[in-house]
Image: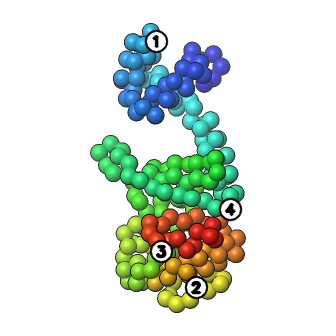
Amino acid sequence: MPKGSPFGENLRAHVFYLRFTQGIAFERLARLLSDILGLEISEGALVNMLDASRDAFAAQQSAIRQRLLSATALQSDETGLRVGKSNWWLWVFHHGDSDVFVAEPSRGQEGGRGLGVRTVMVTGDAAATAAIVAHAVGLDGAVCPPGPIPDSVHPEQFAVFAGVPPEDKYKLIKAFQKGGHIVGMCGDGANDAPPWPAM
């Protein structure tokens, strides 16, 4: 907040906690501050208080993003999130003590775009099936022909790697790393275990 603001750091921290951790709506938050602390703060003042912190949060998010992208491994996960009356996806990208959360209306690759992440799909499924699934989640691009993974493959060459046995997932990650890429991986089955030593 600018110098001379009537709201101190402790009050602002308390408002952030109640609004974002507890999910309290502005109308109820203004009433709580009045009832509990005897402070008469309008909903508009609460919005302005949060808005004034936007630049500070953006600077911290940028610093965290840089720490994540300088790591040798990047982990991610996603879960459903309710926004208004719509289903969205909440992505978390993390490494060590750094985390970034990204909320997107689609489960596709948009989640990583804000972080500068390029998403590719690697699956043991047949190419035709993989292409249909990839398109459904927003991964439009070339499908790598079935067969051995080339040593010099780059993630920007293909959106989908299909018919890949578990042991070749390890080779693919090593090929990406050899090309100077930081690799993160999500998987939901035993077939996704062999690549982990490469991470």
The image shows residue 178 at horizontal and vertical percentages of 70, 75
Q: Which residue is mark 3?
A: 191
The label nearer to you, 3 versus 2, is 3
Along the polypeptide, which appears first: circle 2 or circle 4? 4
The image shows residue 56 at horizontal and vertical percentages of 62, 35
Q: Quadrant of residue 140?
A: bottom left
Is mark 3 in CB contact (under 8 Å) with mark 4? no
Residue drawn at point x = 51 percent, y = 52 percent:
92
Horizontal side, residue 124 vs residue 97: left or right: left
Q: Which residue is mark 2?
A: 149
In the structure shown, which secondary structural element does the residue marked by tag 1 occupy? helix
The three-letter amino acid code for the residue at tag 1 is Leu
Residue drawn at point x = 37 percent, y = 80 percent:
129
Crowdedness near tag 4: few (<14), some (14–19) or many (≥20) residues, C-alpha within 10 Å: some
Identify the residue at the far top of this view: 38
Crowdedness near tag 2: few (<14), some (14–19) or many (≥20) residues, C-alpha within 10 Å: some
**Label placed on residue 72:** 4
The answer to whether residue 147 is visible is yes
In the structure shown, which secondary structural element does the residue marked by tag 3 occupy? helix
The three-letter amino acid code for the residue at tag 3 is Asn
Is mark 4 in CB contact (under 8 Å) with mark 1? no
The label nearer to you, 3 versus 1, is 3
In the structure shown, which secondary structural element does the residue marked by tag 2 occupy? loop
The three-letter amino acid code for the residue at tag 4 is Thr
Along the polypeptide, which appears first: circle 2 or circle 1? 1
The image shows residue 19 at horizontal and vertical percentages of 44, 30
**Label placed on residue 37:** 1
Above or below residue 116? Residue 44 is above
